[in-house]
Amino acid sequence: MNTEYKYTTDGKKVIVVGNLNSQEKIVQEIFLVNGNEIPSGENFVVKSLHDAPAISWKESELIKLESRYIKDKQEWDSKIDRLNQDKRLAYDSLSERVKWLRNISKEPRSEDFKKVINHIADFLSDTEKWVFVRNYQGWHLERFNEDGVNSLIDRLEDSYGKRRFDSMKLLSLFGRSDGSIVFRINDYSDGSGSDRDVEFFKSKEDALLFIQNEFDNINEYRESDLKNAEKFNLKPDEAKLKVYKLKRNASIEKQVKELEDRLNTLKSKLNEN
């Protein structure tokens, strides 16, 4: 006799045991035991059976609504995340400006403004000017005239040694979050690329005093710092110079040891032949 499986109206899977009468059937419920379907429990009588699990109209609509809710929730969550990101970016940008304005209001930097005004006045006059700027290749000082600026631009190259200026960009005035004001120059004439602080001086002597002070404030020398010192005839600190030489010599000794080990390894391979 073939086993007949059916489903009750409330979703139970059953095996048909027999007919009670023309309208009612005797069934037994199917349970899953260790992954196997096994009839178990007492027999019971049902009036209606289905060939597949039956779902009421209400349940069907609830499933559709749940699916729609999940889809809409994901879409709105994504929109909210984007809005929160935009809000954070706007807040960070605004907060720096507000911080600067508060610092200005607490401590008006009249000297900074006077300095800016004097610089602008100097640009409009024939007053002697010197410009100092630094980049990865070192520190640079030039007289601020056409020849000096062109020479400076030629030195401000990128890490590949390529000139990064198609044309000169007018200097931009920036306000830092601490309330100070600084001139900067960008890599490209449209204001894109990285930017560098620019310092102006009325004489070369003033510029060299500033450069010496900058050099004195370096905590630990690097090779580039000593090249700048040689370039501008700066006086290094003997204690810092000693620390630099000790670290440099230790680094050289390490490299020598690595090269000797490499050489010995290669010699051993030659002897194997």
Image (spheres, grey):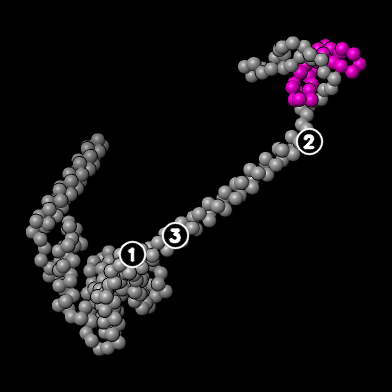
Residue 201 screen position, x and y as percent: 21, 78
Identify the residue shown where x is 19% and y is 48%: 255
Magenta segment, which residues?
Answer: 1-26
Identify the residue shown where x is 74% and y is 39%: 61
* SS at circle 2: helix
| Residue at mark 1 to residue at mark 3: CA–CA distance | 14 Å
Asked whether 166 or 132 is in front, the reply is: 132
Identify the residue shown where x is 67% and y is 40%: 66
Residue 15 magenta-drawn? yes
* SS at circle 1: loop
- Does residue 79 appear anywhere in the picture? yes
* SS at circle 3: helix
Identify the residue shown where x is 18% and y is 75%: 207
Q: Which residue is mark 2?
A: 57
If you read the primary sequence from the N terminus, does the residue marked by circle 2 or circle 3 appear first?
A: 2
Q: Which residue is mark 1?
A: 177
- Location of the N terminus (image quadrant): top right
Residue 270 magenta-drawn? no
Q: Which residue is mark 3?
A: 91
